[in-house]
Amino acid sequence: MTNSFTWKTKFKSMIIVDSEIFQNEYNVKIAIKTNVADLKEQSSYFERIKSLYEYVFSNTVTGCRNDALYQTLVKKSNNRFIELPTPPYDQVMAAVCFCKSNAVLDGKITVTELELSSYQGDGISYSVDKNSKALTLLDVDDWFTKKFSSFDPWWLRSDTATYDREMPKGLYTGHFSWNNATNIMVDKEHENHAKIFEFNPKVLDGGKSKDK
């Protein structure tokens, strides 16, 4: 039997806009549908999505990959980052959160809709589901070099990466690691945390094949 419920959470991230840094707090409301009958398994994956917002997204710096200040901070600071293909508009953040949430859940439970607003967002809330045009904002070309061009960007992968770095042995896979379905832990070797993983493309309604 399928169960559905909603969950509310929030996380803080500094955002880079027009070469300035602003404090921001995001409010997120998530509609969830369970796809497995085992209550323990449901609970395990719910804990995983909680960790995504409470640890992985929280206390980060968010910016566009092509922003000069973002690139400076990446090189000169030890912050954790959320890297976007566009400036950090709330609509883009909603799309990213929707995609990453579903990616880490491995199909065990599904985020059917996500609503996001923020302190800097002038009171506007954005809702995203699998049919939303907002997903086209994440269409990217040349995100990776040719060597890694077949791989998904971080928001479509189930690891804990919130930005992409090409490393000698593969793609960076995150500051944290999933210890198991319920626990998240800091990977003390995270600076060297990379692997070549099997290419498993995901097709989302609202992607490049959908009219813009």
Image (cartoon, helix red, strand yellow):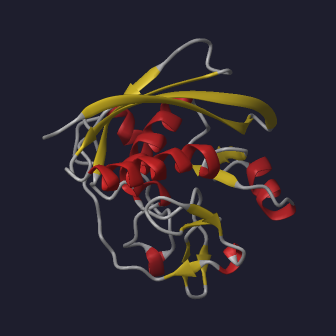
Residue depicted at 30% across the width and 70% down the height: 200
Q: Give the image location of residue 132, x and y in percent.
A: 30, 32
Q: Using the rendered image of the protein, determine whether residue 192 is visible from the camera's viewpoint.
A: yes
Residue sitting at the far bottom: 169
Residue 95 drawn above or below residue 127: below
Out of 186 and 25, give the one closest to the viewer: 186
Q: Give the image location of residue 38, x and y in percent.
A: 24, 53
32 left or right, relative to 196? left
Residue 119 drawn above or below residue 4: above
Residue 170 drawn above or below residue 33: below
Q: Give the image location of residue 204, x and y in percent.
A: 26, 48
Quarter in which the C terminus is drawn? top left
Out of 34 and 90, give the one closest to the viewer: 34
Residue sitting at the far top: 123
Quarter holding residue 210: top left
Residue depicted at 82% across the width and 56% down the height: 72
Quarter in which the N terminus is drawn? top left
208 left or right, relative to 119? left
Out of 204 and 49, give the one closest to the viewer: 49
Q: Give the image location of residue 4, x and y in percent.
A: 26, 32
Residue depicted at 62% across the width and 13% down the height: 122
171 left or right, relative to 200? right
Out of 108 and 72, give the one closest to the viewer: 108
Residue depicted at 77% across the width and 31% down the height: 23
